[in-house]
Amino acid sequence: MLSVTHVERVLRELPRCRLLNGYGPTESTTFASCHPLVAADLRGSVPIGRPIANTRAYVLDGHMRPVTVGIPGELYLGGAGLARGYLGRAGMTAECFVPDPFGPAFGGDLGGRLYRTGDRVRWRADGVLEFLGRMDDQIKLRGHRVEPGEVEASLRAHAGVREAVVLAREVIVGEKCLVAYLVPEQPAPAVSELRVFLEQRLPDFMVPSAFVLLEQLPLSANGKVDRRLLPLPVADAADSVQPFLAPRGPIEEVLAGIWTTVLRIDRVGVHDNFFELGGHSLLATQVVSRILATLDVELPLRAIFDAPTVAGLAEHVVAAQHNETSLRAPPLVAVSREAYRATAD
């Protein structure tokens, strides 16, 4: 996958140069698609274009059904450039070169074959293929399948992000979460800004729980990102951009205690953000459950997303307590039999 940063540099420093991105695995005779690159193409990733002559490209789901524009799927290739298979490896050939289920109606050949690239792509509205990453890079996180490449592409679409790598890391003991490693433009964007940017483009479970800003990404000898050298983020309230402020009352003290238990950290300030400390939706459900058990207040899960600080959540608790009190029936008052008869008459 071409680096957005390097493509931008070439387009900027060599304005008279025509830059073509050629994509294709060896199994499809090296090139299967190409795209002439311009600055407007760089929307977080570098497009790989349209199929070249005598080549067919399909974006299919896990059941080999075509997906619509904008939906990620696996790229399958067919056409004249397809290899016959792997020499002396019949099993691998059968696994990767599969029967073409579409045939002449879709431009294929009766009894033809397709090559499963293992690459995750999607069609853009203009008919151009966008590369998102490898299928085998997918991770399963809290019951959801997440494609880190899709999160990386969304991050790179932010004007303040030069490079991005997303991994699943165990920031809290026993709890894996997504961590985004960024090389920012200057001035660097705030983490809260990046989080809101992603929340507008991705489902909650794909928004990283931690963001690490680096001067540069560590590279291996062959120029690729060495993921083993990426530092583990520290889930500590001391790292928050907000100055530490201790709880100021019994409700904030209870909430802060719940957060330190759930997040497994030493202390929480009233303005620290739950999600910036490593929290996610599954841990948020634990917080809601503990609030019910300790304060006898039932909050919706959405309350933590709307008010992800101890101070903000405390306001929700107070409001819920007030509502419950106002809805209660007035207490029963004992009256004498004579007084009851007087009111009945």
Image: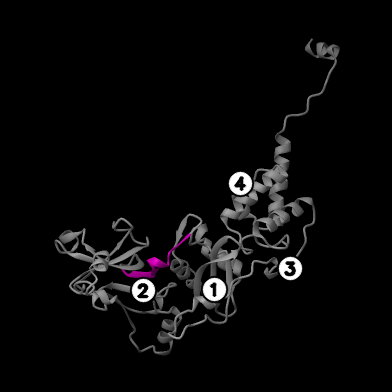
Amino acid type of the residue tagged 2 in the rendering: Pro
Mark 4 or mark 2, earlier in chain: 2
Disc 4 crowd rating (10 Å Cα; few below 14, some 14-19, many 20+) is few
Q: Mark 3 and mark 2 in contact (Cβ < 8 Å)?
A: no
Residue 195 within the segment the image draws in magenta: no
The x and y percentages for residue 155 are 50, 70
Query: At x 51% / y 58%, what residue is drawn?
Result: 205
Mark 2 or mark 3, earlier in chain: 2
Label 3 sits on a secondary structure element that is loop
Mark 3 or mark 1, earlier in chain: 1
Relative depth, front residue between 44 and 299: 299
Q: How far apart are marks 1 and 2 (CA)?
A: 22 Å
Magenta stretch bounds: 128-140
Q: How far apart are marks 1 and 4 (CA)?
A: 32 Å
Amino acid type of the residue tagged 3 in the rendering: Pro
Query: At x 28% / y 58%, what residue is drawn?
Result: 64
Disc 1 crowd rating (10 Å Cα; few below 14, some 14-19, many 20+) is many
Relative depth, front residue between 236 and 276: 236
What label sits on residue 181 in the rendered view?
1
Q: The C terminus is located in which quarter?
A: top right
The residue under label 2 is 47
